[in-house]
Amino acid sequence: MTATARGVESRGRAQVGVGNLRTDRWWLAPAATALGLLVFVVYGGVRAFQQQYFFADERYLTPFYSPCVSVGCASEPGAAHFGTFLPDHPLIPYAALSLPFLLLFRLTCYYYRKAYYRSFWLSPPACAVPEPHAAYTGETRFPLVLQNAHRYFFYVAVLVSLVNSYDAIVAFRHPTDGFVVGVGNLVLLVNVVLLWCYTLSCHSCRHVMGGRLTHFSKHPVRYWFWTKVSALNTRHMQFAWITLGTLILTDLYVMLVARGTITDLRIVG
């Protein structure tokens, strides 16, 4: 043993001779997490910069392009709900105002930190499995110290969720057929509801509702909201994964309808 040995190999620890004593497939969880996150990042990255097939049936706007504020959005009448004022460029996504903040919101999310710390950085990869790093500084140095900005990205995420809600609501009105309900409306609606569940179940939201209060009895309204957000917070991990799936499925549905691969089934109208 060297004088600089640390962790499970440090002086005074039992010399086991193997990395760990786990006999189960402990590596499956971090491997599945890494695969799931990679699928979303690759799919989302390709779609965000594809700059086509983002608006369907003159009313369905994919969340990957919302709000659509680039000049190129004008190619699809009705897609630019808030005007077009950003220049077109292959390296600038049409939703350049929202995507960076949404990415940072998820990247700094408490659950996602645990997920990619374990799956990509092996810090640690699983319970009772030591990490391969010699030193540990936590989130006290750059760039991980920036994780503390998560609470501010939460506020932007709320604004983006409001925009997504607006997109889902206005999609019920067709420019020529008036009020209609199609399968795409249900897809957008379910997606935005689940996005709200993920956003409001955030730990930062829980702190906003009930943080810095000495007596809950003096703030019954905030206490009520805090209890509801706390109930959602217990499912934050599930909502984190579910919304990754619904975002892909919603975008895929809009893209297939826009390409003419499938036809949106009208339920009403």
Image: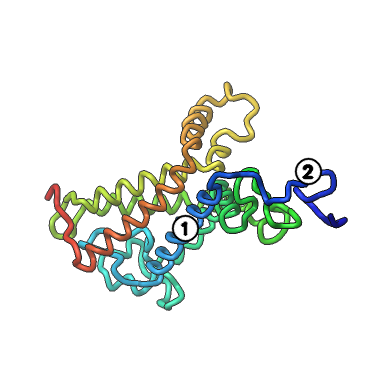
Residue of label 1: 35
| Residue at figure coordinates x 40%, y 64% from the top left | 43
Closer to the camera in the image, 126 or 53: 126
Look at label 1 and name its amino acid.
Leu
* Name of the residue lying farthest toward the bottom: 89
Decide: is 74 above or below 101.
below
Q: Secondary structure at mark 1?
A: helix
Quadrant housing residue 86? bottom left
Of marks 1 and 2, which one's residue comes earlier in the chain?
Answer: 2
Closer to the camera in the image, 142 or 11: 11
| Residue at figure coordinates x 78%, y 43% from the top left | 14
Residue of label 2: 14
Tell me the colour scheme of the image: rainbow
- The answer to whether residue 258 shows anywhere in this view is yes
* Name of the residue lying farthest toward the top: 217
Q: Position of residue 42 (x, y in %)?
A: 44, 65
